[in-house]
Amino acid sequence: MAYSVFAAVLSLFTVITLYLSYYFGQWKNQPVVCTVSYTIGWLISLLFVGVLPIDISSINNITDQNSGSLSVFVDMQSLHVFWTVVYWASQLLTWIILPIMESYAGSGEFTIMRKFRSAIIDNAVIYGSYLILFICVLIYLLVKRTVSFDAASVKVLLITTSNTWGLFLVVFFLGYGLVEVPRAVLRAASPITRLRFGYFSLSKRYLEYIEDEEELKMVLAVSLFLTKLTVCPALYRLDTSTSPPFFLHSSRVFEHGPTPAVLGTRGSPSSVLSLWQRLVGANSRVSSLEWYWRCRIYPLLLRALGTLLGVVSLIIVWSECTFFVREPLFSLMSPFSVPTFKLKWLVFFSSLQFVSFVFLGYLGFCVYFTAYRLRFFNYYRLVPNHHSDAISLIFYGYMLCRLTPSLCVNFLCLAHLDSHVLFSSTAFTKFMGHLDVVPFIANGFNVYFPIIVVLLCLVTFFSLGSRLLTSLGMPQLIGPSFIDKRLNQHSSKSKKLGFWVCEVLEFITFYLALS
């Protein structure tokens, strides 16, 4: 049963990844190598979240073999091999393969080999900088006798450095996601808020439409000037007439469908009246059920879900601030702080697996939600229905590969599921180590830095960043938000100034293109 659950988790997350890759990507138009690379990156990120609860549950076989629980057990050796392959594959993707694929997708060369050569040259400077920085840090640590020059210490040093950078991004994303996810659910429960959001999105899309239309006019004007040809002449040669087989097919469907049978009852008033009453009655019942669902039940369910997610966010924020205190345990996510643990539940580890999956899944959803909403001035953005470009998909692929291992380490610290509390640690902890090679990172940064998530949550809750950007007339970085009208009026002058600056720059660009 244990390995069947493990295989089911792998299969489920593979199907989810393929669906998301197809839903956002353009499989027919983008290079196959780019599609395969970012799909594998997304899959590895999801596997971290799906397999770690199984790893946590597998401690049951070591700590309490007579508990009688229905835990999902996978032996430590298999899990160690799995984590080794998955982790180093994620690091290979996030630091080498996916950046090269991003440069490959954005290259202007015309052949595959020239695209690869251009991508490698573009990333060679970055890799050289990383290598020089790592060598300098390694020499400093060796001089200070902080680490010993062996394979194990170098491996843990690499993992520590990568997780420190990933933890910085995780805390930043959690500070936004832990507040915005419950808020988004509560907003969806209010029809008035949804209407305001619709107006806001419509005005924003209209401004984007105006900007794209002006840019299209400039491109068409330059193209017309350079080629001396009519714009899109093929459009005038299209034959818009409908072929006769279409009408023949439509007539056959009409003749063999239910419509002639209904029209044949025109001469019988009773049949028409009966049919009308049935249609009206069915429509009335469906409308009533739909009204109760949309106006009564659905908003209540969303409010309850939003409140529950808000409570979970508060638990996570409190645990982020107190997980470094081990005696007494203040972290609410730690199952060992529950008094009933001393009673030795028979299903403790099964419950532990479920709770771990819920909390880790929510943490991952908050991080992925923020990554989805994150838009660097609309350069990287995920657009549904096959409208996302390959560069954005690859960017989110290596970002998730960089974030997820640090997220799992942070979760194990929040829940006190490492060997500092347990007598036997998880296979993930055995592979990653305890990250105590560098004292500054182990005792300082990785302990006290997550407290900053409280400040980020407060900034997100009061929309301070969006208010500041709006008052300056700058585009918002993370998603849409509802700002007070006074702030919009206050920023109108800055917006007008920015508009005229953009107009002048566009005029200069257009003049240079024509000249």
Image (cartoon, rainbow, N blue to C red):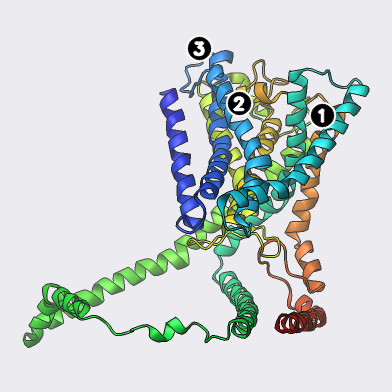
Left or right of residue 277, residue 409 in this image: right
What is the C-alpha distance between the residues marked 2 and 1?
A: 22 Å
Residue located 61% across and 44% down the image: 364
Look at discs 3 and 2 and give the one toward the viewer.
Answer: 2
Does the image show residue 311? no
- The answer to whether mark 3 and mark 2 are in CB contact below 8 A is no
Dot 3 crowding, Cα within 10 Å, few <14, some 14–19, many 20+: few
- The residue most toward the top is 66
- The residue most toward the right is 144
Mark 2 vs mark 1: which is more N-terminal?
A: 2
Query: Residue type at mark 3?
Result: Asn
How far from the left and from the top, in percent, is residue 272?
13, 82
How far from the left and from the top, in percent, is residue 166?
72, 41
Query: Residue type at mark 2?
Result: Thr
Residue that numbered label 2 is attached to: 84
- The answer to whether mark 1 and mark 3 are in CB contact below 8 A is no
